[in-house]
Image: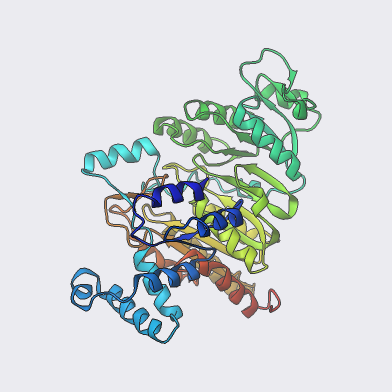
Amino acid sequence: MIAESIIAAAQNFNDIPIVVRLQGTNAAEGQKMIAESGLKLYAEDGFGGAVRKAIELAGPPPDSTAAASTPREETQAATNTSGNLRTGSVSHQSIRTFSSSSLYRTSRKIPSPQLQLQSKRSMATTSATHTSSYPNTATIPNLSIGPDTKLIYQGFTGKAATINALATLTYGTQILGGVSPSLKTQTPHPHPSLSHLPTYPTVRQAISSLPTKPTATAVLVPAPHAAAAILEAIAAEIPLIVSVAEHVPLHDMFRVQAALRTQSRSRLVGPNCPGIIAPPAKCRIGIMPHLQYTPGCVGIVSKSGTLSYEAVGATTREGLGQSLCIGVGGDMLPGTSLREGLEALLRDEGTKGIVLLGEIGGEAEMEAAGFLSMWNEELGRSGGRRKPVVGMITGRTAPRGRVMGHAGAVAGSSATADDKIRALEAAGVRIAVHPGEIGPLMRELLEEEGLVGGR
């Protein structure tokens, strides 16, 4: 579908060459369609190759306009790359400079502070200064899902939950049943392939009726009903609650946060998140595309679902695989913060290295960097072994006041992308400029620590 759309769009401006970096489901078929389109479309499966091809097609910039219209570093990049092209190669440093100053240019203008605030509220953006969820950290171990995790669904008979449950069950996750508020009594799920799983009117009834108590719930209900479902799960003391809905009203999330602060049993991931997955255990809670994941040793914690999938692909290509992946999401009031997800991976025995993916807006990355510094200092005193961390901050070149991405990340008055990068580097994090670097950097660090063998 993506290839078809690109081909259709390119017919309207075929004088401009377009390099399509395409990966994912049916990528080979999509690349073939693009190659055979007869248009000025060029398919690549990696960021490095895509950047090289774009530079090759663009050619050297006119000397008279380059210096006047581009920042100094971009002018230097253009000079370097055009020089390298004359010798038939593009240096690694040139690609880093080019991609860091050119990625993420498409953004949506917010015309006024009032509209910016309204946009942040309506989209549950990541630009708020709220970084931590609730002070209790006793529930962070609840994030370590595995083969013993027992899952129920809220909104079980809905279309989204039904499709998700079919895939999750096939993947290998234990599903006990689910909840549908429209029911009056226990009933089998209406789908033939799920009819062996019971559906109950409430979470309380599910817990009291099921032979085994659920340890996690997937809240797959529309945004207007998400808070009520989360609160029901908190009241029932479900250890792990995952809510994927976008655009949950802000006042609803204030109610959820208030409830979370009064208890010490439940841990929320989301809303506005892809969920959590442990590939070695074949355990998925949420909407992560599980077929892309491979069992391995790299933990990933990310605000962006899409960027986490890029990190999955990058670490898979390096033969590292994934141990535990936590998508904390982009809500203004997240149930689990970036720092808390990082702590879960630092404590996870199956995780040898960590990928931390942040973005512009808010202070979550600064908080994570501060925590990592303290963690590593303590390890230094105790003689413990540090886990290597690769980080990336998206939106480095996004102008202030412009929204980036569907989650609504926006650079405001909080820490800048460069502030976050400096803080992470000070904590010992190696920074990737673009997603294509994540896998090679992680392999390099793991090999240096002797945690994996060379290839």
Look at 71% across and 14% down and name the residue there: 185
Residue 301 in sight: no
Quarter holding the C terminus is: bottom right
Residue 277 x, y percent position in the rendering: 65, 49
Question: Quarter-wise, where is residue 280 in the image?
Answer: bottom right
Residue 155 x, y percent position in the rendering: 61, 26
Q: Is residue 327 above or below residue 373?
A: above
Question: Quarter-wise, where is residue 71 in the image?
Answer: bottom left
Query: Would you say 309 lies left or right of 176 here?
Result: left
Look at 31% across and 80% down and name the residue there: 79
Look at 44% across and 70% down and name the residue there: 53
Query: Which scheme is used to colour this image of the protein?
Result: rainbow
Query: Observer-nearest residue: 39 or 307?
Result: 39
Residue 386 x, y percent position in the rendering: 60, 71
Query: Would you say 166 lies left or right of 247 here?
Result: right
Query: Would you say 50 lies left or right of 157 here?
Result: left
Residue at far top of view? 184
Residue 186 x, y percent position in the rendering: 73, 17
Query: Observer-nearest residue: 440 or 43?
Result: 43
Residue at far front of view? 38
Q: Is residue 17 above or below residue 79?
A: above
Query: Observer-nearest residue: 303 or 228?
Result: 303
Look at 60% across and 46% down and name the residue there: 288
